Amino acid sequence: SAIFLYFTSGNIIKVKDVLRTFMLVNIIYFIMYIFNSIYHTNYIMSSKLPQYIVDLYPFLKHITNPTLMFEGMACLILVLVYLPISLHNRSLENRRNNE
């Protein structure tokens, strides 16, 4: 439904919005990292990957710091999601300029 709302609302998402989202997610992750350190838990898999994930994907056993992996995945996902949005933004701007 969020994708439908974006494409029908006519709003334009800019790169600064994507960067703001990335920073917000990192702040939440940092807060959970502190919580995990205090209470010796592993929410958001910040200290290590659970064994069942390593069993499913054996190549992950070589990753000693899941935080770096999650940061890389987040950057990749944000870029991949922003590509169609940027194309849609261009078409919206062209439409507005032609009116």
Image (cartoon, rainbow, N blue to C red):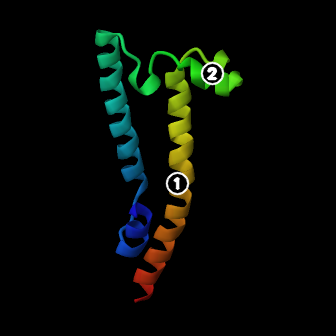
Which numbered disc flags the more N-terminal residue, 1 or 2? 2
How many C-alpha atoms fall within 10 Å of the one at disc 1: few (<14), some, or many (≥20)? few
Please state the total of marks drawn on the protein image.
2
Image quarter where the N terminus lies is bottom left
How many C-alpha atoms fall within 10 Å of the one at disc 2: few (<14), some, or many (≥20)? some
Kindly give the residue lying farthest to the bottom in the view shown.
Answer: 99
Q: Which type of secondary structure does the marked residue at label 2 adopt?
A: helix
Q: Position of residue 56 (x, y in %)?
A: 66, 27
**What amino acid does circle 2 point to?**
Val
Kindly give the residue lying farthest to the right in the view shown.
Answer: 59
| Residue occupying the point 57% across, 42% down | 76
| Residue occupying the point 41% across, 18% down | 42
Front position in the image: 53 or 83: 53
Cα separation between marks 1 and 2 = 27 Å
Front position in the image: 15 or 39: 39
Q: Which residue is mark 2?
A: 54
| Residue occupying the point 44% across, 87% down | 98
Q: Which residue is mark 1?
A: 81
Q: Which type of secondary structure does the marked residue at label 1 adopt?
A: helix
Q: Position of residue 60 (x, y in %)?
A: 65, 23
Residue 1 sits above or below residue 74 on the image: below
| Residue occupying the point 32% across, 31% down | 27
Q: Position of residue 96 (x, y in %)?
A: 40, 81
